[in-house]
Amino acid sequence: MKHYALIAAALLAMLPAAAKTTGGIDSKMMERIKASYVPTAADRALRNALAANDMDKLAKNSESLNSFDTDFSNRVETKGITDQKRSGRCWLFTGLNVLRSQMMARHGLPELELSQNYNFFFDQLEKSNLFLQGIIDTAEKPMDDRMVEWLFQHPLSDGGQYTGLSDNIMKYGVVPSTVMVETFSSNNTSKLNNLLSLKLRQWGLELRKMKADGASPQAIAAKKEEMLGTVYRMLAMTLGEPPAEFTWTRKDKDGKAVSTKKYTPQSFYREFAGNDLKGDYVMLMNDPTREYYQLYEIDFDRHAYDGSNWTYVNLPIEDIKTMAIEAIKDSTKMYFSCDVGKFLDRDRGYLDPENFDYAALMGTDFPMSKADRIRTFASASSHAMTLTAVDLDAEGRPVKWMVENSWGDGPNKGHLIMSDRWFDEYMFRLVVNKKYLTDKARKVLKQKPKMLPAWDPMFLPEQ
């Protein structure tokens, strides 16, 4: 270490004087920084503990263990926990979990799981077309144009959000999980995603060159269709080919066959669901960095070129809670998303800011507000789940909430419980049926949305 310090000091001495005083760490500053750290006996003990242990285990607040319970005053029952495994398809699992609960309740089905793989196939095909057409539309712009850079940075992902889900289902329908089962690549999406992204970037350059060389719009469109044929082949080889029609047997609560019929994915959706997922539902957002009671739209934040941009009503958190409570009391589950990695006690399946005392462990506080965390990219919606329960006190105020997760079985039978304080700080999005909107929120829908750029901090897809 002494040898490297001498080399660093020699190199520093060779620099011009101006370079030594314009923000770098010189030798004198390093001496002052080192001198500021005078470890106590407690510091040395902590350092030894941190060197050999998971930081979360050391920061776990033992006092918070005493205030944890799993009882809820209002709860929508869950039938069967799903598992997205090593994929970023939480948005798809969440949407299909909400939908299947409606289908089971409406038709008295004892169980039902919808195929995530089926809709994921078309999601990846549509996203590939979205990227390629976006490249064609911006082909005359330079490579360092902000939109062109954004396209090449985000050619494809397995993450997503609600409008992508609603566009997908309304266009392609749904099928039971037994009709198009999961594969290794659907459960482990990273390799397929990387290969598709690499291919799309290659094709993006090719399409830009065709445009620069004066190719006709018809020739460019034909080349794009040829490229999509290759995408379809890659998806069919890894995920299987989606069925155009299938035969399905409906069973009663005792497992006896009631009827056997032939369906298309679209006719199956119409018969057992039929919801207008685009017209009947609205995305609510709590983003304190922007004006409340305002309608926003994020440009190019969609899964399909002919689909809808993500549009949302930005509201105070208390307004969102009011609508969520009304829906849960009406036995309705909701698409919900949050920053799930913050203060998650995985052993208990519990989310609460008091779970871990990082300030005491590190000897410094972390006081940033929700708005400041959003502005600095320290927090954003990262995971979608299904909101299923709320626990209200005697005055009707929420104490805690519960979501149905898609990480397989675990604590609380595959559910996560969150304190109301955590909900305030790390909840971002909720999709509700318009019938639960307050009058004030309903009026916002009449506004012309403010358009935000594709690289807005809220773009981050849920995984």
Image (spheres, rainbow, N blue to C red):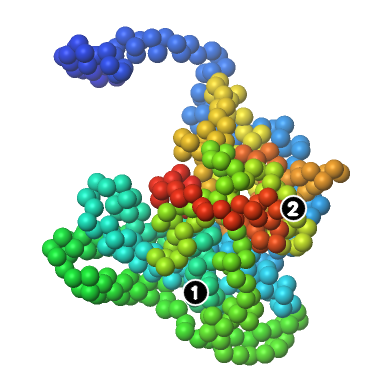
> What crowding class fits label 2: few (fewer than 14 Cα within 10 Å), some (14-19), or many (20 or more)?
many
Image location of residue 368, percent across then percent down: 55, 29
Left or right relative to 148: residue 328: right
Whole-percent x, y for residue 95 in the image: 58, 63
Question: Is residue 391 left or right of 43 when viewed as pictured?
Answer: right
Q: Is residue 91 visible?
A: yes
Q: Mark 1: few, some, or many residues within 10 Å (few <14, many ≥20)?
A: few
Horizontal arrangement in the rendering, residue 71 relative to residue 385 (left or right): right
- According to the picture, the residue beneath numbered tag 2 turns out to be 325
Position of the N terminus, as image quadrant, is: top left
| Residue 355: quarter of image | top right
Which quadrant of the figure has residue 339?
Answer: top right
Q: Are marks 2 and 1 in contact (CB under 8 Å)?
A: no
Disc 1 residue type? Lys
Q: Residue at x 31, y 9 (%)?
A: 28
Residue found 59% across the figure and 43% down from its top: 292
Residue 413 in the image: above or below residue 59: below
Q: Nearer the viewer, residue 108 or 326?
A: 326
Please state which amino acid type lies under the numbered disc 2.
Answer: Ile
Could you give the CA–CA distance between mark 2 and mark 1, rounded to whole angstroms? 31 Å
Q: Give residue 236's position: percent from left, percent from top.
A: 38, 75
Residue at image location 51% in from the left, 44% down from the top: 380
Total numbered circles: 2
Q: Please tell me which of labels 2 and 1 falls first in the chain.
A: 1
SS for tag 1? Answer: helix
Q: Which mark is residue 171?
A: 1
